[in-house]
Amino acid sequence: MERPITLGEYIVENQKDFAYAKGELTALLSSIKLAGKVVNEKINKAGLANIIGKLDKENVQGEIQAKLDIIANDVFIDTLRNRGEICGLASEEMESFISFDETINLDSKYVVLIDPLDGSSNIDVNVTVGTIFSIYRRISPVGSPVTLEDFLQPGINQIAAGYLIYGSSTILVYTVGNGVNGFTFNPGVGSFFLSHPNIKFPDTAEIYSVNEGNYEHFPKGIKKFIKWAQRTDVSQNTPLTARYTGSLVADIHRNMLLGGIYLYPQGSLSPNGKLRLLYEANPIAFITEQAGGKAVDGKNRILEILPKELHQRSPLICGSKKLVNRVENFIDKFPGGC
């Protein structure tokens, strides 16, 4: 029986699909893989190591931080800084970006934006969490300190994006703009192996994922879609099954494999949406489109939104194209608030 290909082997064999410096991308993804393995170990031992629970402080988003939020953030910063492939990093957990000005980083051409621990509110109840990352080619001159503009790029400029999902198994999913592939971690040998080649949203969608506790605060078009998804109509494959975990990575991963749609729309509780454009919406939108899906904010393509600040929020509606199109039709037909 032939051995499955490892993540490292796959990246090297497919470097032709990467438009920029081949070896640099390989090294950068290798660094992200290494940091993910460390975070995976921390999560698996969280209860034993007394690192579950919350801290008595908020992050820049105004959210109470979990202990593992800080640990995961530090792991990715230290790993990416020390390996020299990037010149700067912005994280959902930090108010501003970090410039890596050490000698090893001076000639680096890339910046990383990261949500180090997506869904961290689920940690204490042992529900799936993840890491989301996004890679851009810097705009400022190589050799100079990074600038805010290096990070405030539209999603269409991403050269790679992905996520790690820490669940019953640990899986790394990524794209460089030539499809989406998933690699499952084998802790026995310490390597990621190709397990989900060329991921595509199925033609038939089964699932809708939305926090229906906010239903009364949703726009009319979203409410109409939810009621459509719940009705019985065999000709339109409804009702859909409701599945929502509160972990973006977990919901997107499931919906991409089984077929479905994820919705976190704007509403009276979050007039600008709740998810972060740079750390969550953009990388997930890039992956979604590369898997044959669609990602919008209700009116605009996510990847074409021009960010104005590091922690800008955005609505996100993404998943199977037919379902996203249907949501847009409901929004157009039933404009207005709650």
Image (cartoon, grey):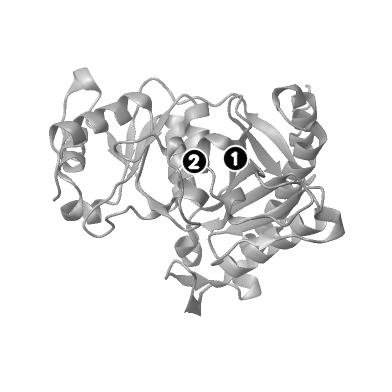
Tag 2 secondary structure: helix
Against 71, is 178 above or below? above
Q: Quadrant of the N terminus?
A: top right
Left or right: 39 in relation to 8: left
Q: 107 or 235, which lies in front?
A: 107
Residue beneath the point at 74% across and 62% down? 78
Left or right: 107 in relation to 198: right
Q: Which residue is disc 2 drawn over? A: 284
Q: Which residue is disc 1 drawn over? A: 161
Against 42, is 321 above or below? above
Instruction: Verify CB contact (< 8 Å) between mark 1 and mark 2.
Output: yes
Tag 1 secondary structure: strand
Q: Position of residue 177 (x, y in %)?
A: 60, 28
Residue beneath the point at 68% across and 47% down? 140
Q: Position of residue 151 (x, y in %)?
A: 58, 50
The amino acid on which the numbered mark 1 sits, given as a three-letter code, is: Ala
Compare marks 1 and 2 and give the one earlier in the sequence: 1
Q: Residue furthest right?
A: 103
The amino acid on which the numbered mark 2 sits, given as a three-letter code, is: Ile
Res. 235 image quadrant: top left
Q: Label 2 neighbourhood size at 10 Å, few (<14), some (14-19), many (20+)?
A: many
Q: 217 or 198, which lies in front?
A: 217
Give the total number of marks visible in the rendering.
2
